[in-house]
Image (cartoon, rainbow, N blue to C red):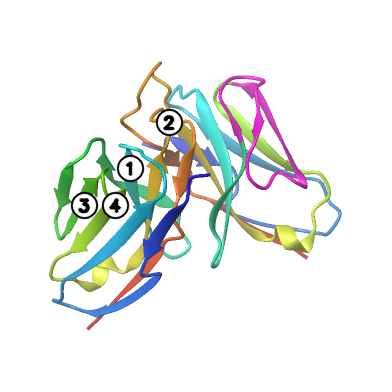
Amino acid sequence: ELKVEQNPLFLSMQEGKNYTIYCNYSTTSDRLYWYRQDPGKSLESLFVLLSNGAVKQEGRLMASLDTKARLSTLHITAAVHDLSATYFCAVDLLGTASKLTFGTGTRLQVTL
Amino acid sequence: DVKVTQSSRYLVKRTGEKVFLECVQDMDHENMFWYRQDPGLGLRLIYFSYDVKMKEKGDIPEGYSVSREKKERFSLILESASTNQTSMYLCASSLWAGGLSNYGYTFGSGTRLTVV
């Protein structure tokens, strides 16, 4: 059974600071997705990582994938309040987007 | 530019009622999914469907059923609503391209259901 673990579960950080969210998974996969969820809203796609060593960046967020370590990271650079949200990673074991397994989510709170 | 539409944003139903949650996608996706999301429990898969009239149980199907009569529509049915089914329900769809997918899921806006 595929297990996907994120840590930390909750992160409070000051504006301007850097931090990393980790996503570990238990079974080999080379397809991983990151989603963002604002309070009371649905999930929106942030990054699609499709191979070992993949790195994607959008603004202050950068995601990477190490399939050998079964680890993905979401790095936040110089956080701003607008980044406050819950972030989920999701692993696609079959590679066909037919059944993603989601992590428990990391709730990020950026304070002034 | 709406792609996955859930019919209700908020819904309040009484215990014992039969509840229908509707989801429609306009992207011609083969795969459709229903999740529920609860604090501390993340997203849990209820049912999914790979094609019209096909359905597969997810991790927590008890108390739910689904219907997929048309490719674009996937309905979640609570046969007899109970208070422990109060939750946020998320519908999602994905494209099956005959092999590896590069796109993941597209989610609907969610339905917050309260059973009283």
- Determine whether the residue tagged by mark 4 lies in a helix, strand or loop: strand
Mark positioned earlier in the residue sequence (4 or 3):
3
Residue B49, visible in the rendered structure? yes
**Label 3: chain letter:** A
Location of mark 3 (residue) = A63
Q: Which mark is residue A32?
A: 1
Chain for disc number 2 = A
**Closer to the N terminus: mark 2 or mark 4?**
4
Which chain does the residue under circle 1 lie in? A
Q: Farthest residue to the front: give it.
A: A68
Residue behind mark 4: A71
**Residue at the spot x=18%, y=78% of the render?**
A15
Residue A14 in the image: x percent, y percent? Answer: 21, 81
Dot 3 lies on which element? strand
Is the residue marked by circle 4 packed among few (<14), some (14-19), or many (20+) residues within 10 Å? some
Q: Mark 4 to mark 3: distance in Å?
A: 11 Å
Residue at the spot 65% in from the left edge and 31% down from the top edge: B56
Q: Please provide the residue range marked out in magenta.
A: B48-70
Q: Where's residue A68, x and y in %?
A: 26, 44
What amino acid is found at the position of numbered circle 4 in the picture?
Leu
* Label 2 to label 4: alpha-carbon separation: 17 Å
In depth, the one of A65 and A45 nearer the eye is A65
Task: Kindly report which numbered mark, 4 or 1, lies closer to the viewer in this rendering.
Answer: 4
In depth, the one of A77 and B100 nearer the eye is B100
Q: Tell me the tag on residue B10.
A: none
